[in-house]
Image (cartoon, rainbow, N blue to C red):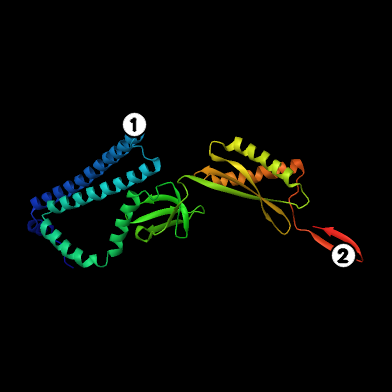
Amino acid sequence: MEFINFQEFFNIIDPKEIILLGYSFLKVIGIFIISRVVYKFGAIAIDQMFKDRFNLNEHLKVEQRRIETLSRLLKSLLSYLLYFIAIVTSLKIFGVPIETVLAGAGILGLAVGFGAQNLVKDIISGFFIIFEDLYAVGEYIKIDDKFGMVEEIGLKTTKIRAWTGELYMIPNGSVEQVTNYNRGSMRSIVEVGIAYEEDIDNAIKVIEKACDKVYLEMQEVIDEKPNVMGVIALADSSVNIRVTATAKGLNHWALERKLRQRIKEEFDKEGVEIPYPRRVIINGGELETGS
């Protein structure tokens, strides 16, 4: 069994080279630390820039959600730029010929480019999505058959969170049709059925009373006061009456729920009957009814 002769080992390796190598590693570590610090200050500067623009300039005021989206994108670009500079500088420290590497990377890029067409398409589409302000972080949208709240818009993908918790990561290049539920007012539609035996005019007055209560409770999110449109259908077992209203943003669902609740409460108070399935049985000439 042979033992390592440490004396011969140190004679072969020049201690100065070890010191220089260690010094190079320290410089590389320092470069990445500096890059991280610069990123932190850059991120703070980006946040402050958008904050001042949003608060002070009325003509250039941008929606808070769009500001957050642009802020995240700029931070992402800043991060990529700083890491690229740090890697190139580190290679120079170790004596790697950067020009040769970049030239080789250019040739390799041409070869890889044919296989990266989808990536380029995603990035270009991402820029246009943000530039045209199709949607922003925090908005509720539909992309194809995917519904959810926008959590992040990157250069390559858009991430939306469904209300059930699923996170969809959709390539920007595949975004063809977008439905945005946060731009402008959304219409609430509630249909209520009453029994054929009920007085329609009286039922409408009761519904209007319920609508007035809902308006007082939710007027901060209501754009158009709830309005009774009238009878819209004579169904098999009910006379259907429609109520419409408009609400800001995604509050139309909450408005519909509140309308149904208050209408049911008023119907109970005034004795207005909501139809339910009934059964008629003729037994030996006697008529029996039941539910």
Badge number at residue 185: none
Q: Is residue 232 left or right of residue 133?
A: right
Say what secondary structure mark 1 lies in: helix
Q: Is residue 136 left or right of residue 15?
A: right
Q: Is residue 222 left or right of residue 115?
A: right
Picture quadrant of residue 37: top left
What residue lies at 36% left-to-right and 37% top-to-bottom? Answer: 61
In the depicted view, which residue is nearer to us: 129 or 243?
243
Q: Position of residue 100 (x, y in %)?
A: 11, 60
Is mark 1 in CB contact (under 8 Å) with mark 2?
no
Amino acid carrying label 2: it is Ile
Amino acid carrying label 1: it is Leu
Q: Position of residue 44 (x, y in %)?
A: 30, 38
Question: Label 1 vs label 2: CA separation?
Answer: 78 Å
In the depicted view, which residue is nearer to us: 272 or 138?
272
- Give the residue at mark 2: 282
Picture quadrant of residue 7: bottom left
Question: Taking 33 as reference, is 125 above or below it?
Answer: below
What residue lies at 64% left-to-right and 37% top-to-bottom? Answer: 212
What residue lies at 57% left-to-right and 38% top-to-bottom? Answer: 218
The answer to whether any part of residue 107 appears in the image is: yes
In the depicted view, which residue is nearer to us: 282 or 224?
224
Q: Position of residue 22 (x, y in %)?
A: 15, 49
Badge number at residue 56: 1
Which residue is at the far top? 56
Q: Give the quarter of the figure containing the C terminus.
A: bottom right
**In front: mark 1 or mark 2?**
2
Say what secondary structure mark 2 lies in: strand
**Disc 2 residue crowd, few under 14, some 14–19, many 20+, Cα 10 Å:** few
